[in-house]
Amino acid sequence: MQLPFPSVEVWQQRLGRETDATMISLVACVGEDLVGTVGLHLNAGIPRRQHVAELGMSVRDDWQGRGIGTALLKAALDLADGWLQLRRVQLSVYVDNETAIRLYRTHGFEVEGTQRQMAFRDGNYVDAFLMARLRP
């Protein structure tokens, strides 16, 4: 849901927030190149929602289809299930992002609803699915 062409400085700032206990970020690097990220946004300090996290991830266009997204998602879900005691991980994904939807379904996410005109992209309003996975 970010704007295109973020600068290196923007990514350094986002990934360098070590003091933010509500955000856990993982990165995928090939050599010196950052090729993907995943983040779990926790609800720390909200007692009735501490079992829920919002997942956001991206893989660089030229690295898609090479297992980067699968590796990042598996690592994030391992943290969620085995270390953070999360029961629910949820996300939003554009309805036309079939590759991502297939990846999420493979890892137990289900579509719970459609967010109509959820974002503005390429001059149009676009819909997104709200997907969630409950810990098995």
Image (cartoon, helix red, strand yellow):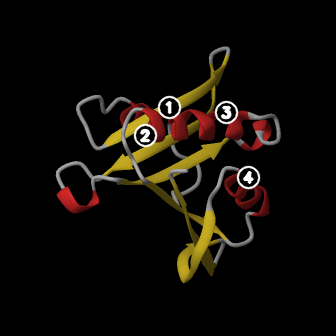
Q: First in sequence: mark 3 or mark 2?
A: 2
Is residue 16 placed above or below 73 in the rendered structure? above
Q: Amino acid at mark 1?
A: Leu
Is residue 113 placed above or below 36 in the rendered structure? below
Most extreme residue toward the bottom is 116
Q: In this orientation, which residue lies closer to the viewer: 108 or 68?
A: 108
In the rendered image, residue 87, in percent from the top left (x then y), is placed at 42, 53
Most extreme residue toward the front is 136
What residue is drawn where x is 71% and y is 61%?
101
Q: First in sequence: mark 3 or mark 4?
A: 3
Q: Does residue 89 appear left or right of residue 98 in this picture?
A: left
Tell me the CA gap for discs 2 and 4.
31 Å
Residue 93 image-quadrant placement: bottom right
Q: Amino acid at mark 3?
A: Ala
Q: In this orientation, which residue lies closer to the viewer: 127 or 34?
A: 127
In the rendered image, residue 70, in percent from the top left (x then y), is placed at 70, 39
Element class at badge 1: strand
Most extreme residue toward the top is 31
Dot in front, 2 or 4: 4
In the rendered image, residue 51, in percent from the top left (x then y), is placed at 33, 53
Q: Amino acid at mark 4?
A: Thr
Residue 126 image-quadrant placement: bottom right
Element class at badge 4: helix
Q: Residues within 10 Å of mark 1 (few under 14, many from 20)?
A: some
Residue 4 image-quadrant placement: bottom right
Kindly identify which residue carries mark 1.
26
Q: First in sequence: mark 3 or mark 1?
A: 1
Dot in front, 3 or 1: 3
Element class at badge 3: helix
Kindly identify which residue carries mark 4.
106
Kindly identify which residue carries mark 2.
10
